[in-house]
Amino acid sequence: MIFPETRLRRLRYNSVLRDMVTETKLSVDDLVMPLFVCAGENVRNPISSMPGNYQLSVENLVEECKKVAASGVRAVLLFGIPAEKDEDGTVACQHDGIVQQAIRVIKAELPGLYIIADICNCEYTTHGHCGTIIDGDVDNDTTLETLANQSVSLVEAGADMVAPSDMMDGRVAKIRKALDDNKFEKIPIMSYSAKYASGFYGPFREAAESAPQFGNRATYQMNIANIDEAIREVDLDIAEGADIVMVKPALSYLDVIYRVKTEFRMPVAAYNVSGEFSMVEAAAANDWIDRDRVMMEILTSIKRAGADIIITYFAVDVANILNGK
């Protein structure tokens, strides 16, 4: 039937009915909060381009994790800023590395909080690239060794999941083998499978002190125009043993999220990245938008596109709204 017998507005007049027929619903269980841990004591450095976010020393990170847990968010993604860096990122593999230290303390204080460890080298190298430089570019296979060692070290410290974000070919298989060889068969891998060479990462590079000191990351992160290539990347990561695949960034890549979900029908994560967060904060600070309304609209769109897991700096604020706090 058509108008006037069919009137779709009948489903919209009453707020109770609108809620009943809502097709896409965000849940606190969807959310992961990214956090930055740095060396030192009593450090709480504001990140100027990411209002409300900080570089935190271990004891302050634990307090922040308590706030995250109190909101109902049950998972965090950790990034580290070490006291010293080196040429190939091996500082990230040390038993007493900054993230390793943080994981041990968090697990002692908050054993139920799920800890995802980012696996990459850009925060740990003097040059800011994601691996070992040979002949002016990141050497893929040399970097794989560091990534595997870093993964094992972080899981030994207590990480519940590893998330390689480097975009080296073959890293999922290398990490999976290293974990299995060390009897960590139960540890899942969430791979940054389709990570684009995006302009939306700027604030993160301030937060993690990871801006490349020369060139860019176009030889390993993906061309922003390509979607078929993203499908190939995801397919390979699944074949190598990825348990969850990720699309990053999220907002400008909703079509990629949708296609990955529909083609592979496996858990899909999406990273609502720093630039996406900061644009909302900047516009809200100028009273150009309703911050919370836009925040919820963006995250709903990511969920609607097919993401099962949403990594977002809005996680605690969204959880509080969902829980009526």
Image (spheres, rainbow, N blue to C red):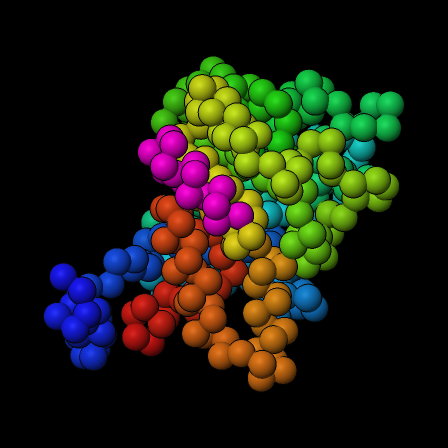
Q: Residue at x 84, y 44 (%)?
A: 213
Q: Which residues are magenta?
A: 253-268
Q: Quadrant of the C terminus?
A: bottom left
Please provide percent x and percent y for residue 322. Answer: 32, 68
Residue placed most toward the observer, 142 or 246: 246
Please provide percent x and percent y for residue 12. Answer: 22, 74
- Main SS, magenta residues: helix
Residue placed most toward the observer, 84 or 276: 276
Q: Residue at x 22, y 74 (%)?
A: 9
Is residue 114 covered in magenta? Answer: no
Is residue 261 covered in magenta? Answer: yes
Residue placed most toward the observer, 195 or 146: 195
Q: Is residue 74 above or below residue 173?
A: below
- Viewed as shown, does residue 132 lie left or right of 277? right
Please provide percent x and percent y for residue 276. Answer: 58, 60
Q: Residue at x 18, y 79 (%)?
A: 14
User: Taking the image as drawn, is residue 287 in sight?
Assistant: yes
- Viewed as shown, does residue 180 lie left or right of 90? left
Please provide percent x and percent y for residue 19. Answer: 21, 69
- Viewed as shown, does residue 8 lie left or right of 115? left
Q: Which image quarter: residue 216?
A: top right
Q: Which image quarter: residue 56?
A: bottom right
Q: Exactly how many numbered labels are in the figure?
A: 0
